[in-house]
Image (cartoon, helix red, strand yellow):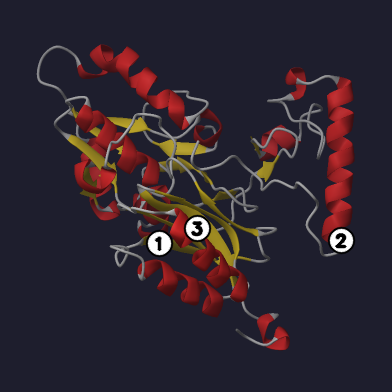
Amino acid sequence: MPSQSSAQHLPIRVAALYRFVRFDDPTSLQEPLLKACEDNGVKGTLLLAKEGVNGTIAGFPDGINVVLRHLRGLPDCADLEVKFSEAAKMPFHRMKVRVKREIVTMGQGDLDPAHNAGTYVDPQDWNDLIADPDTIVIDTRNDYEVSVGQFEGAIDPKTASFRDFPAWFRAERERLLGQGKAPKVAMYCTGGIRCEKSTAFLASEGVEEVYHLKGGILKYLETVPEELSMWRGECFVFDQRVSVGHGLAPGTHALCYACRRPVSPQDAESPLYEVGASCPACFDERTEEQREACRERHRQEKRAAAEGRAHIGAKMPGRSRDE
């Protein structure tokens, strides 16, 4: 690890990662992985399940590299999917490694995306696929994410949680796919994990031609020139950056620390927006007493941050990517 003096001049590296793979005993992997992260100053959240690993971590480059070597040394994880970006300061308060039933929660049993997912499409080929009139494009993210940006012409399921996606698709299937020759279905998400699982779900439902964006929106924004891009807006991310744009440049959105929804520059001008207490999306969902509780919590979090410590029970901005 770099010395304290040299570390002050290094950027924080953020690594969003996942891998669908069969772990017979994910619990046995938990403590060694947590130790590798803590020993190298890495913070964030990693999820382990029998279906694989998923999460976002941040730290100085040397520490991130050590943790990634540890992860790639796990069974069948040499091809771990990782997307890098940088942050001006540490975007996480602590390091958590959790064992869960699923690394991205859909609640549809044993889908096995490691073997039954749809066809990968590289970012450089994505525009041609979604511009094809015989293709329907589905955004597999949640409503608060879609509000920040999406691909031109994409269908928004308006789901509050990824768990809602199967019911939405089953209810809309006939309208989407019709009675004749079914269209190709192209799906995308932030980093690739949700659309990989959702393509496995559609395959289990008998949909034959289903595709997903390799590396997700983040890889597309990183590699496709802005002048050729079919992306409109910014991309919500699950850390304190809140959103990113083309080239993964920092976006313009803030976060409502009361409801954890993104706040656009226009929302920030609303009289219903109060830092730490409310935004236009959640103002009518809470009483004044609840907003005062949010104000107090925000004051406590600010004091803790000023003192260089994590506030007890503090949550990271945004909602969990496994939702």
Location of mark 2 (residue): 306
Query: In the image, what residue type sits under mark 1?
Result: Val
Vertical side of 146 occupied by 87: above or below: below
Using the numbered discs, state the Cα–Cα distance from disc 3 to disc 2 in whole angstroms. Answer: 28 Å
| Quadrant placement of the N terminus | bottom right
Q: Around disc 2, counting alpha carbons within 10 Å, would you say few (fewer than 14), some (14 to 19), or many (20 or more)? A: few
Q: Residue at x 57, y 48 (%)?
A: 238
Residue 23 % position (x, y): 34, 54
Vertical side of 229 occupied by 151: above or below: above
- On screen, residue 166 versus residue 178, left or right, reads right
**Do residues under tags 1 and 3 come within 8 Å of each other at their CB atoms?**
no
Q: Earlier in the sequence, mark 2 or mark 1?
A: 1
Is residue 247 something one can see in this rendering? no
Query: In the image, what residue type sits under mark 3?
Result: Leu
Query: In the image, what residue type sits under mark 2?
Result: Ala
Q: Which mark is residue 82?
A: 1
- On screen, residue 39 versus residue 205, left or right, reads right
Residue 20 % position (x, y): 32, 51
Is residue 128 something one can see in this rendering? yes
Residue 242 % position (x, y): 61, 48
Vertical side of 266 occupied by 31: above or below: below
Using the numbered discs, state the Cα–Cα distance from disc 1 to disc 3 in whole angstroms. Answer: 14 Å
